[in-house]
Image: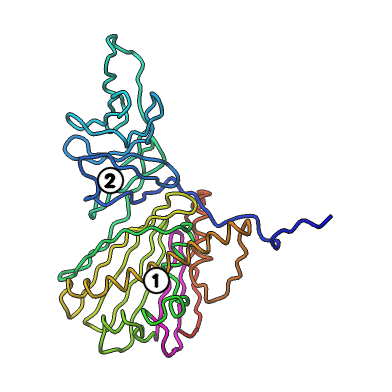
Amino acid sequence: MHPKLIPPETKGHVSVARLARFWYVACQSGELGSKPLARSVVGVPLVLFRGPGGAASALLDRCPHRNVPLSLGSVVGQGTLECAYHGWQFRGDGRCTRIPGLLETETRERRVPSAAVQERDGLVWVYPELDTMPESSPFELPPAGTNYARVVREVQADGSLHATIENALDVPHTAFLHRGLFRGGKQSEILATVRRSADRVEVQYDGEPRPSGIAGRVLSPGGGIVEHWDRFMLPSIAQVEYRLGKDVHFRVTSFCTPESDFRTRMYAVAEFHTRFPGRMVSRILEPFALRIFGQDADILRAQADNIRRFGGEQYASTELDFLGPHIWRLLKQAEAGELGGEPVVERTVRFLA
């Protein structure tokens, strides 16, 4: 009898953390109109809708009567959500206000679990720990200043939250996966300073030349040395910031929402100021940005497929993996409720990019 063929031995776990007691972006404000909207956040199926006065609400996307998705229904009257199957109606707090055809008054309260919602900066945030009053508030974007253009784009990746965030903040891969679009020219020695605190980790790069790809040449045709920071902030925020001389400043804050273990929705808010009109810069750069993300999405999908194919992960990190191990540590500490009190950890690394 031939021996059974199996893949090489690997670690039997994947880098997935499930953090329900945090705020996540569910959609953009403009996406939530007169119809219900289905979203999954940390694996929790939700239905979002606008109630009285246009206030956003979120309920578990399941009617308690016959388990039909409430997102198939409609918003009626003064802002109640009506199930498409039997017409049960629910307020934003989840309480059932009407059961059509029922003549006798019910004494039993019927309701759907609800999620806390806040709306700010053109984004609708939800707190997926159901029927919980959060003690915190959603992340607030720092002011960008006057004469800044702002662009918001929504993209999706078939990768875990950890992998997607690491990819968004990873410098070394850009010279290879995005060769010619962002980096890939002559290498220079750069000093990276990594700082980790209780809820975030940041890398500051010193001595970095302007990125040699098309995007860098458009943003700063004069070249020169840049100031560059990459940041991760719990639970799922990736931020990239560049200053190129006095004329160019841009910051991209990506709010990453894990829909499931291997599906992440990203809301990227780009704020930038250059010597050129913002609309023109956006029109020129957007095709390149979308192509770069397309390359990232393909590699994340291939990474996730390979992890599943081998039945687990086998990572080998070096000092060039500035953020990934720190991000994973913070995610696991947050999942276990062990945040707070940790001193700032700092180290420096010289590398070529």
Name which quarter of the figure residue 165 lies in. bottom left
> How many numbered tags mark residues here?
2
How many neighbours does mark 2 have within 10 angstroms: few (below 14), some (14-19), or many (20 or more)? some
Q: How far across and how far down the image is residue 226, in percent? A: 33, 83
Q: Which residue is mark 2?
A: 118
Q: Is residue 64 above or below residue 155?
A: above
What residue do we see at 44% from left, 47% from top? 42
Residue that appears at 69% across and 61% down? 7
Report the residue marked by disc 1.
230
Residue at horizontal 42 percent and vertical 69 percent from the top? 295
Q: Three-letter amino acid code at disc 2?
A: Gln
Q: Residue at x 51, y 75 (%)?
A: 347
Q: Which SS does the magenta portion mostly show?
A: strand
Label 1 with label 2: CB-CB less than 8 Å: no
Task: From the top left corner, tell me how far across and down residue 47 is, in percent.
Answer: 33, 39
Q: Is residue 35 above or below residue 221?
A: above
In the foreground, 209 or 77? 77
x, y (%) of residue 201? Answer: 44, 66
Question: Which of these two is toward me, 165 or 76?
Answer: 76
What amino acid type should be assigned to the residue bearing mark 1?
Asp
Q: Residue 210 magenta-drawn? A: no
What is the quadrant of the N terminus in the image?
Answer: bottom right
| Magenta segment boundaries in residue numbering | 183-207
Helix, strand or loop at mark 1: strand
